[in-house]
Amino acid sequence: MEIFENICRTCGNDCLEALNIYEDSAMVLDKKLPISDIISACLPANAALTALNKDDDYPKQICRICVKKLAIIYEFNNKWLTANNEFNVALKFEQRRKRGRQSQT
């Protein structure tokens, strides 16, 4: 919609140097990813009501400040998930090791 032409979808501020959520990409974790994918990855799992839809009437832009914040959130989420997966592997290994010890006694 024209009323949202220069409005950032994430902060609601008027922005002169906006990026298109559906057409532009941003660098995160040394990869160039579509901004819409980054936003979707950062939304809570129960965000069906606020999910991105290219055909909705909401703003299609995001300001550069929000892109930077979005990249930080994406990187944090990625680090957390990676660490969590590593902890899960370590815990499973430890559980197997303990079971192995118990079966030997």
Image (cartoon, rainbow, N blue to C red):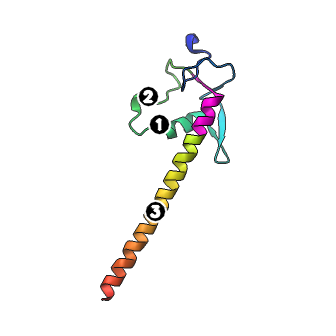
| Distance Cα–Cα, label 3 vs label 2 | 32 Å
Q: Residue at x 50, y 39 (%)?
A: 42
Dot 2: element: helix
Q: Is residue 80 left or right of residue 31?
A: left
Q: Is residue 70 magenta?
A: yes
Q: Is residue 9 left or right of residue 26?
A: left
First-in-chain label (1 vs 3): 1
The residue beneath circle 3 is 87
| Distance Cα–Cα, label 1 vs label 3 | 24 Å
Note whether residue 23 is visible: no
Dot 3: element: helix
Q: Quadrant of residue 38?
A: top right
Q: Residue at x 41, y 67 (%)?
A: 91
Where does the magenta region start and end?
60-71
Amino acid carrying label 1: it is Leu
Residues at badges 3 and 2 in contact (C-beta under 8 Å)?
no
Q: Residue at x 58, y 11 (%)?
A: 2
Residue 55: x, y in percent? 51, 22
The residue beneath circle 2 is 50
Residue 11: x, y in percent? 54, 24
The residue beneath circle 1 is 43
Considering the image in quadrants, where does the C terminus appear?
Answer: bottom left
First-in-chain label (3 vs 2): 2
| Distance Cα–Cα, label 1 vs label 2 | 8 Å
Q: Is residue 83 above or below residue 102?
A: above
Residue 94: x, y in percent? 41, 73
Q: Is residue 13 above or below residue 103?
A: above
Q: Is residue 70 above or below residue 89?
A: above
Residues at badges 1 and 2 in contact (C-beta under 8 Å)?
yes
Instruction: Using the image as rendered, state which of residue 43 and residue 2 is in the foreground.
Output: 43
Residue 74: x, y in percent? 56, 43
